[in-house]
Image: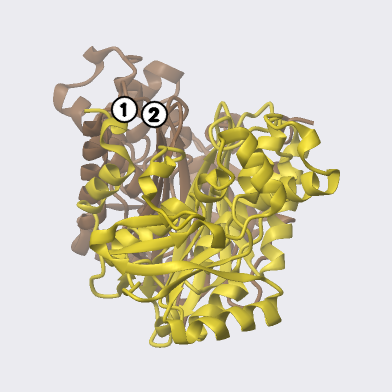
Chain colours: A yellow, B brown
Amino acid sequence: MLLKDIGEVGIIKRISAYTQDEKENIIVGIGDDAAVVRTNPELASVYTTDILVENIHFSLSSISPFQLGYKSIMVNISDIAAMAANPRYALISLALDLNTDVKLVDEFYEGVIKAASSYGVVVIGGDLSKADTLIVSVVLIGEVEEGTIRRRNTASVGEKILVTGKQGSSAAGLNLIMNKVNLNLISDSEKDELIKAHIMPVARVKEAKLAAALGAASMEDISDGLAADLRHICEQSKTGARVYLSKIPINDSVRKISKALTGSEYELALNGGEDYELVLTAPESKVNQIADEILKICKTPVSVIGEIVADTENISIIEEDGSSKKLSFYGFNHFKDM
Amino acid sequence: MLLKDIGEVGIIKRISAYTQDEKENIIVGIGDDAAVVRTNPELASVYTTDILVENIHFSLSSISPFQLGYKSIMVNISDIAAMAANPRYALISLALDLNTDVKLVDEFYEGVIKAASSYGVVVIGGDLSKADTLIVSVVLIGEVEEGTIRRRNTASVGEKILVTGKQGSSAAGLNLIMNKVNLNLISDSEKDELIKAHIMPVARVKEAKLAAALGAASMEDISDGLAADLRHICEQSKTGARVYLSKIPINDSVRKISKALTGSEYELALNGGEDYELVLTAPESKVNQIADEILKICKTPVSVIGEIVADTENISIIEEDGSSKKLSFYGFNHFKDM
């Protein structure tokens, strides 16, 4: 049996069987944005790690070494943010061809430091080794008070579903970079904005901490796409969800690109991924304060896009005309980066 | 300018310029076996990470998935041991081809758990992604009381140099696996022992903690080879060293293989690498107790192989006839795995 036959969920289930979850000082084990371990009575340590492989996860023809360094750190900071934790330390490992120009390494680290320092993250170590293609491995270490941690498995029926920022911009930017889009569709400034969303994403650290402090129940960052990440929350919380298509916040430029590429103006927002916004759930009584405070303090818009319902309903997408479809209709289940 | 032109030391110096070392809660930054961060008043957290790439660092034609999983964890536990710390948690990331048989992943994780559980290490997370070849990334997290930490930069002139176990066995084992050795040189049981030393190394966690408790001053694990790792200690401590060739503990089988392959029976012991023994320094007054206790409690032999001298002498190798040569004569400075 091959990996592609059992799929991502199958592989993670299989691996989970080999690991120990939530014993002794392990507060969160495998299966969330990051692992959490109790390191002292007040603070827990939060760990996440990622491998990025050239020509699989990135191409140096479409991202500069600086941008790659920046993004490698930022997407891991986003995983720490998704636990409502403070990112603190990073280890960066590079495997690369010895015929690589030193300038690439310099620029890569400049990007790393740019992203890390803007969040107060300090690079404390790493590893260097040979390889035929460039491989980046990042470890991000965060800290959080145990009660502040927000997980994927803590959504409850009746809670509202909120997202920060706009959805699908990163995927639209990627399609622009790859020249798959008719450029007459959008303006130059819209183009620049979408490409920036893909290449230089922003992790929602402050937003996540505010949301947790103001009563968010469950939380995840949107790395695989809103549909996939909301599905993680539902599966782990044993709930369903109802999402109103018209309430998903999407830039007009993204709607146009999505429509032109896929026939649906929602496709990139639902399945694009890499926006690194947050999807979270909260009781209705907390929703206004969460949205207002995040907008006021972080200048980040927050939108209510639906609600958590019983497991039996699965994830329903409510169309503009009020009709309801299963989320699976919208093409989720691409084996993207696993 | 290419990476191979500036070499390992050049790259690490360059990267260090981008990182912050020993500020605030950072006890050990870049350049040691592992990074150390103060996480609470009593305990510090210790972090190390490694990337292993198929056909660069290992070949599945000569190591089984089980052995690869085992060794991936063990070599990182060894880095934690080298700081005299307790290994506690691991994150394992795999990037692999989706046409990989699930059995490989199962066996890999069985090896991971075998190594981890034998040291009380719990696997708490990781990442899965696509790649064309198998890539393994390991993060090992340890704990240590701050005063117990042993570093590379704390050797002093006059201290003795000690090593645990035997040197060169792993490199001899690798040459056996790669069929580079006339098998008539050694017995079948010797052959098995050397291959095991390469494929299933043992991290010296207990030995390191005992040595630290009994007065070892500086310490490192021997991953790059005795010559290279002793050079790290000397460079970082700003000392030289004198090593007596005849005192380096080497199995007879390794001497034979080394002589046949290189013309010198010491070559594999000095430059072979991957033995994961410890090299440490200690004041003469502490040496006997360190050696006796480690032998008694761990059944691991400890040998005094030389002494730390002033920087100006560099690293001298004292031959059996009493003549002295610079270490560089012995061919160190291969750009192995960086």
Examine the rendering and report whether any part of residue B280 can be seen: yes
Give the residue furthest to the right: A188
Give x and y (percent) for residue A271: 50, 46
Left or right: A238 in relation to A285 = left
Give x and y (percent) for residue B100: 31, 27
Give x and y (percent) for residue B228: 54, 42
Give the residue furthest to the front: A321
Relative to the observer, which residue lies in front, B65 or B270? B65
Q: Quadrant of residue A256?
A: top right
Relative to the observer, which residue lies in front, B197 or A90? A90
Give the residue furthest to the left: B189
Q: In the rendered image, which residue does mark 2 sit on? A: B97
Q: Which mark is residue A34?
A: none
Evaluate if marks 1 and 2 touch, with contact meaning CB atoms under 8 Å apart. yes
Relative to the observer, which residue lies in front, A170 or B300? A170
Q: Residue at x 20, y 52 (%)?
A: A17
Left or right: A161 in relation to B180 = right
Q: In the rendered image, which residue does mark 1 sit on? A: B100
